[in-house]
Amino acid sequence: FGFKGCQKIRGPQIRSLLEAKDYILFDCDGVIWHGEKAITGAAKVVSSLIRHGKNVVFVTNNSTRPRENYVHKFCRLGFTDVMLEQIFSSSYCSALYLRDVVKVCGQVFVIGCDGLRRELQEAGIPCVEEADDPDATIYNCALAPDVKAVLVGHDDQLTFLKLAKASCYLRDPDCVFLATDNDPWHPLSSGRILPGSGSLIAALEVASGRKATVIGKPSRFMFECISSQFRGVDPAQCLMIGDRLETDMLFGSNCGFDTMLTLTGVSQIEEAQEYRNSELTTNQSLVPDYVVDTIADFLPAFEGLEE
Ligand code: PLP
Ligand code: CA
């Protein structure tokens, strides 16, 4: 396999790479923003790409917001030309999966934020209503009789009772086990971390003895959602830009895209080089083709270009 990849690129090389690609796929957190703060130059890069006729899409594992909420966030952070149709979140794609792949007929038990439930409602998928009873325990609570799927995402109101109920529903082999994403943790600007959905899913996988089907990156399903919307996307025309090797670069490799790591987020270039230099061939899927310090490195690539 040789030591391919991890190529640090700048202005003219970025320009020729962009000329070769029709679809630019952006991860969100760590690439275009950090939480509520846009990365310097990112809004300008996104609007330049759109003005130069590129199809720009956003692929985020964050399941906590419905897509319309993302449109507001983009606007608030200065990305004023992003539309609903460009946003592919793990919550939206989970709703599509339940509707179009599982074709679920029955209720879905959701561990997740309200935004995830809203996205399912939008797709016409009924969710089990959580009763607000402080005295409920796994010994005395009712279980819904028609739960056909358990969907697990980020949940900042997680309780033992929710985990216990989900474990009971998953005893039924016909009940589908889905995860919005399997991210282990997320950085906070304070230097602290947030446990990711992956940590909740691990708990339920142990309790149920089953493996969840993951909808978000690195699973290919998000690309299937993108390509069914933009008919006839050729993976060779796509560039995936992300900050985490184990989700974004692997997603890009799984879909057959060229990949770019930006160093404003989780993964460091040394980790990418370690994967590249490792003997394990499976590690090669985690190696980015290209590396930039920040997405703002794209700005010189647009200089002197006609719009
Ligand atoms: N899920 C949650 C709950 C998050 O807070 C984040 C990032 O902040 C993510 C997922 C990862 O999002 P992305 O795929 O845009 O990096
Ligand atoms: Ca990210």
Image: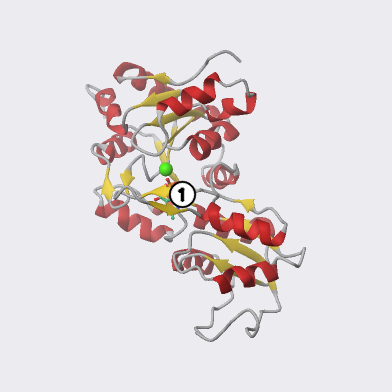
Instruction: Tell me the element at label 1.
Output: strand
Specify the quadrant of the image occupied by residue 140. Answer: bottom right
Where residue 270 sits in the image (x, y, percent)? 43, 25
Of residue 226 and residue 193, the one placed in the foreground of this image is 193
In the rendered image, residue 112, in percent from the top left (x then y), is placed at: 50, 64
Q: Quadrant of residue 27?
A: top left
Which percent across, then down, holds residue 166?
63, 68
Residue at 36% over, 41% down: 30
Residue denoted by label 1: 185
Quadrant of ligand 2: it is top left
- Compare residues 79 and 180 and report the one nearer the observer: 180
Q: How is the image coloured?
A: secondary structure
Q: Residue at x 55, y 35 (%)?
A: 250
The N terminus is located in which quarter?
top right
Q: Is residue 134 above or below residue 95?
A: below
Tell me what residue is drawn at x 36 percent, y 32 percent: 263
